[in-house]
Amino acid sequence: MSVSAMLLSCAEDLGNYQYHELAELDIKGLEDKEVLTFDRLVMNPDLGENALEEDAYSFEWKAIDRNGTYETTILGTERKLDYEVRLNPGSYALYFTVTQKTTALYWQSESSLIVSSSMSEGWMVLCSDGGRARLDMVSAVTGELYEDVLSESGMPEMYGPRRIQWLSDKADVSSPYYLLTDDGATRLGKDAFEWKQEYLFSYESAESADLRPYAIVPAGFGKVIVSDGKAYHCESGMGIDGLYGSAVNKDFDVSRYVGTNVLATQVYAAVFLLYDVDNQRFMSYCPLLVTPDLGSLSPLQTMDEMKNLAEGMAPGAGMIGSAFDEWPEGMDCLYMENTSYDPGNAKMGMTYALLTDGDEVHLYGVQMGDILRYADCTYVIGKGYYGDLTGCKDIAEPGNLFAFSSLKSYMYYVSGETLYRVDLSKTPLVSETQLTFPGEKITCLKFNLYQKDENMSRSYDLIVAGTKGGEGVLRVYEGQQSDGDFSKVTPVVYEGFAEIVDVTYKERIY
């Protein structure tokens, strides 16, 4: 908090004046504040022992938005501020200005004001309420559960919920949240999930196709989705706000999963990982290869082609790792997940892919980088891991759920009512029972990858959600201190939901 006295007008000294001692103010009693919307903000500053009578001054309270708009809002014109907070949630600079009426001298004091709403931070819990997409919110601000928060937004009902997702960048700052469903997708407003017609995903597509993504995967200057077996790219970042164009893959379909580097903070020409389900092989996709600077090449390459292309640009930087000899072919893709686990310290997170060949289950760890290697990544692709999971109990049962830790090389899966852990650093790979959930159907298993630095350690917490007795239950197990062994961890439990499909933590964005 700073206080300064300033003279608003000055003139050339043209004559004799009668001078008086300046009554310097010493403003006290202003503190940094955090308030909720619609609460009352009360500030009662002391002007100090040198102050004149109060009617000798005029007063002004104003808040300046620090969230990008720098908009100014006048909150009051009395010494004592008593204001019902109507500001949007966010960070503000709060200024209190005292002006002496006869001299136009003014004193100004600054403090910080944080405005929150009940939905500024907490768990976004996507439920299937009889098939209808329902979003609940567990507020970290109030500690309360808010059910069906979209019911009054004006958004049309959508069915077949898939995912609730936060894009901290490469999305409109006023609406960075995405609801993905079988019916389609839509953005949601940043403050309380406000909704507008133009938030519908169709407004982000240059094609007439009805795109229904399973996930939006950002990296570098773009983001990739998969809808009905076709992958689509949208260029974004650096002031560009593009649209999803025509399908990336014309002659074959790909699985719903998209691999990329979720560890590096600076990637330019990102390389994405797709799985060709018709020819049963990994494919690499680098959208910037089409630019003249990179040779106007095909952005879609086999893994070996991408490695050779990268080696031609920078010998020795095409590929890192030798966990397996040949890129696999002839298998089905069961599951794929991006993690920030980086065993080679190459700033290339691990993408794990579960591939099946009859009764056999194989796990491949692939690392994706940056074909330009200007910033974080020094390699383009990597062979990071291989393991045979065939001996793990019930590993390929229909309906199994999978999750991979970014803390260490641990894999978790739920089969039936049992949660198993596999230590991927051991050979042979075996499953060990972590937890059991009698009479419960587990519907969501994941690690939430936090995006704010202060929350990064929470990315190792395991989320397990299930349905028992017709009610959804959310459990969060601490991961860092327990070193990924959840068998003796007492979870934080939230109840009162419908069937939980997905869970994402809404971090404060101010």
Image (cartoon, rainbow, N blue to C red):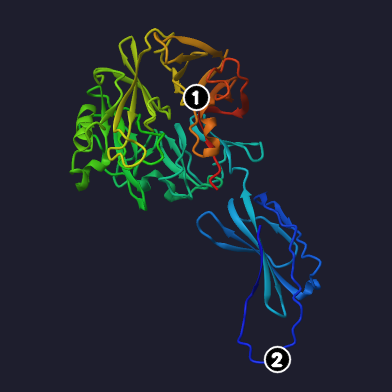
Disc 1 marks a residue whose amino acid type is Cys
Toward which corner of the image does residue 466 lie, by quadrant? top right
Between 265 and 257, which is closer to the camera in this rendering?
265
Residue 460 on image: x %, y %:
52, 27
Residue at far bottom of view: 15
The tag on residue 16 is: 2
Question: Of the residues tagged 1 and 2, which is closer to the observer?
Answer: 2
Q: Earlier in the sequence, mark 1 or mark 2?
A: 2
Label 1 Cα crowd, 10 Å radius (few <14 / some 14-19 / many 20+): many
Residue 348 on image: x %, y %:
37, 31
Disc 1 marks which residue? 444
Circle 2 SS class: loop
Q: Is residue 264 above or below residue 329?
A: below
For the point 35% across and 29% down, which residue is it?
Answer: 257
Q: Is residue 25 above or below residue 377?
A: below
Residue 140 on image: x %, y %:
62, 37
Disc 2 marks a residue whose amino acid type is Asn
Between 142 and 470, which is closer to the camera in this rendering?
142
Res. 229 in view: no
